[in-house]
Amino acid sequence: MYNRTAKNLDTGTQLHSASFARKQTGSESAVQFVDSREGTAAQLKLQAMANNSIAGRSVSANPVVQRLKGAAGTAQEDDDVTFTLNQEFIDKHVANDKAEAEQVTERRIATGKPPGIVEGTAPNNLAKEADWKTAIKDSTDSVPPEGDWSCEYGKSEEFNERLTKVSVPGWEAQGKTGNVNVKATTNKKYVGGLWCVDGGTDNGEGGFTEGTATVTVDISHLTS
């Protein structure tokens, strides 16, 4: 059912990935009989236009709720994933107003890294904690990313630099010590961190029974 591959990371943790076999819909073709009598084609076209109009109103009236969701085979498949913003992320990217955004950035500069922020050539992106969380939850991306995990194996975890792209209202702070400029902006960045799949029912073969393992994500950084 799964294609097994091994992944070696710099962290020394051996992880496994697999490509899930997903159900394909809408790919089967069917034989249809078309009435070619005079006037029928025009009637069908008008009916199709009417159907599209109705469908359009239906979609508009009932927007799809999007979210960071569990991957196929996990207990949260197509449902909310438990995630946290770790302290490192909060220390670097969380502020409640413009003044606090400046203070947080000054503290980052004082640490001496990263070089771009210290030298004032790269901005620090900040937003309220609740806004970061809302944007992450509203993502449609699956965790683990497709192909990075299989229930054929036991506990799996991996650091992923780009888990999902978010768009968050907040601030951009840039400059050198004592001269940091802050402006309001919409932060369009990727968030990354460590995902983990664990706590599933043992399938007796060293892995988990499908649909039982839980996904958790620890968000630790931003990247372009």
Image: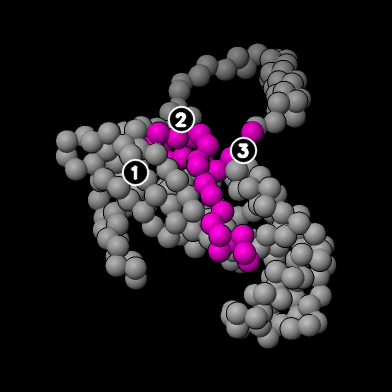
In which quadrant is the C terminus drawn?
A: bottom right
Residues shaded magenta? 65-92
The secondary element bearing badge 2 is classed as loop
What amino acid does circle 1 point to?
Asp
Q: Position of residue 144 (x, y in %)?
A: 43, 48
Outermost residue on the left side: it is 205
Quick check: is 98 in the magenta stretch?
no
Q: Position of residue 184 (x, y in %)?
A: 82, 62
Viewer can see residue 22: no
Q: Out of 156 and 29, give the one closest to the viewer.
A: 156
Within 10 angstroms of label 3, few (less than 14), some, or many (20 or more) residues? some
Within 10 angstroms of label 1, few (less than 14), some, or many (20 or more) residues? some
Give me the disc on residue 25.
2
The image shows residue 20, relative to residue 209, as above or below, that is: below
| Residue drawn at the location 34% of the way across and 33% of the way down | 212
| Residue drawn at the location 44% of the way across and 56% of the way down | 194
The secondary element bearing badge 1 is classed as strand
Outermost residue on the bottom side: it is 119
Quick check: is 90 in the magenta stretch?
yes
Viewer can see residue 44: yes
Contact flag, marks 3 and 2 (Cβ < 8 Å): no
- The part of the image, by quadrant, that contains residue 47 is top right
The alpha-carbon separation of the residues under discs 2 and 1 comes to 30 Å
Residue tagged by mark 1? 198
Q: Earlier in the sequence, mark 1 or mark 3?
A: 3
Give me the disc on residue 66.
3
What amino acid does circle 3 point to?
Gln
